[in-house]
Image (cartoon, rainbow, N blue to C red):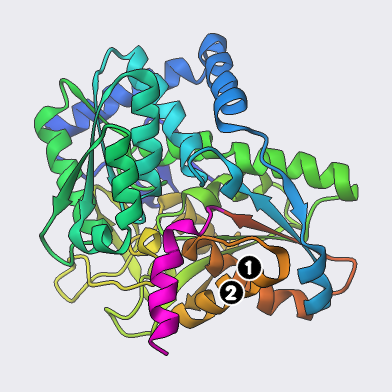
Amino acid sequence: MSRETTMVEGFFGEFGGQYVPDDLKKALNHVAEYYEQIRKDPEFQRELEYYLSKYVGRPSPLYFAERLSEELGGAKIYLKREDLNHTGSHKINNVLGQALMARRMGVKRIIAETGAGQHGVATATACALLDMDCTVYMGREDMARQELNVFRMELLGAKVQGVDRGLKTLKDAVDAALEDFAQNFTNTYYLLGSAVGPYPYPQMVRDFQSVIGKEAKAQILEDEGRLPDYVVACVGGGSNAIGLFAPFYDDKDVQMVGCEPGGTGKEMGDNAASVSYGAPAVLHGFRCYAIVDESGEAGPTSSIAAGLDYPGVGPEHSFYHASGRAKYVPVSDDEALEAFQVLSKTEGIIPAFESAHAVAQALKLAPTLESNQIIIVNISGRGDKDASQALRILKSR
């Protein structure tokens, strides 16, 4: 089975698609048609490359974590430093691509959803840069956890629209953003932040984020003369992970490990590990592995990392799991918090709680491997935004 079928159908095996009303499907297909034009347009690609280089600061370094590797024993650990990007995470890669496309489409109003706030900050940044109106939907619970990022978005000129429904987290922010888009698609562009949602968003986000894996592949070949044995990344919706994984898809000796938010346990409501504890279902207009209740509705989720607290996973990740190309493992809140501290103390790098899930897996994996083996861990974002939350948790113990 091929990784994906035709772009018109928008499926990865049985996952993906457009399970939406006809009016919204029309708007989505308009975006898809425009994307097919710009992805083949050399002028657009040059403009995007200019901003990625001069504004974002790419390429991001691939750093050999020598001290961490020595302390653990076993494999060499390399860190892909997306935390060093402008705005502090991988989110800006995709945001700039979509915002530049929206500007070419003649759209002046951008809406987005955010959980940890990093996508919201990146979207607000791009809108300030390109002089576009920006509204970001964010659950009230996430706004309380990520107060600094709320301020950053507002400072950048965005309107942060709090969402009070449901659990007041990322799933509810996505619901609100989709409703806005359905009502206002004639003058509004929905800048979706992860590799989820109906076609064409998973493909678009994958393509814009693949700069991560393309750089990492070239960098590790330069540094080590060969490809890594493992690539490891955190997975909520899955944009940073698919950006790292996709360029290695055809390299069958490279094992891919996605680290899901295992939360505090296996029961529904205690985690957000859609692949590990979920099942195939339709969520937010696409088919994927998702955490659903007995009625088929999105179930409650929980994670120490606001950006991973989503009840589904991207369709390409769903296909990777179903086909066996990638492995997905749950990482608990406690393991992520421990990794957050370990990386800070050994390498002087404070990772986002999201990224700490991937670091936690590397802490377990590296000692089981040989010294000539290599792991690349994607540090998808920096941990400034999580410092106050970590302080509260650690003080309470």
Marks 2 & 1, CB-CB < 8 Å contact: yes
Point out residue 224 in the picture as x, y percentages from the top left corner. 89, 50
**Residue most extreme to the top:** 43
Nearest the eye: 107 or 88: 88
**Residue most extreme to the bottom:** 397
Residue identifier under label 1:
344
Residue identifier under label 2:
341
Secondary structure state at the residue bearing disc 1: helix
- Asked if one can make out residue 165 in the rendered structure from this viewpoint, the answer is yes
Query: What main secondary structure does the magenta stretch of the protein show?
Result: helix
Query: In the rendered image, which quarter contains the C terminus?
Result: bottom left
- Give the CA distance from mark 2 to mark 1: 5 Å
Residue at x 84% of width, y 65% of height: 373
Residue at x 68% of width, y 38% of height: 214
- Magenta residues span 380-397
Residue at x 31% of width, y 24% of height: 31
In this rendering, would 33 be left or right of 370? left
Q: Which amino acid does label 1 sit on?
A: Ser
Q: Which amino acid does label 2 sit on?
A: Gln
- Asked if one can make out residue 200 in the rendered structure from this viewpoint, the answer is no
Secondary structure state at the residue bearing disc 2: helix
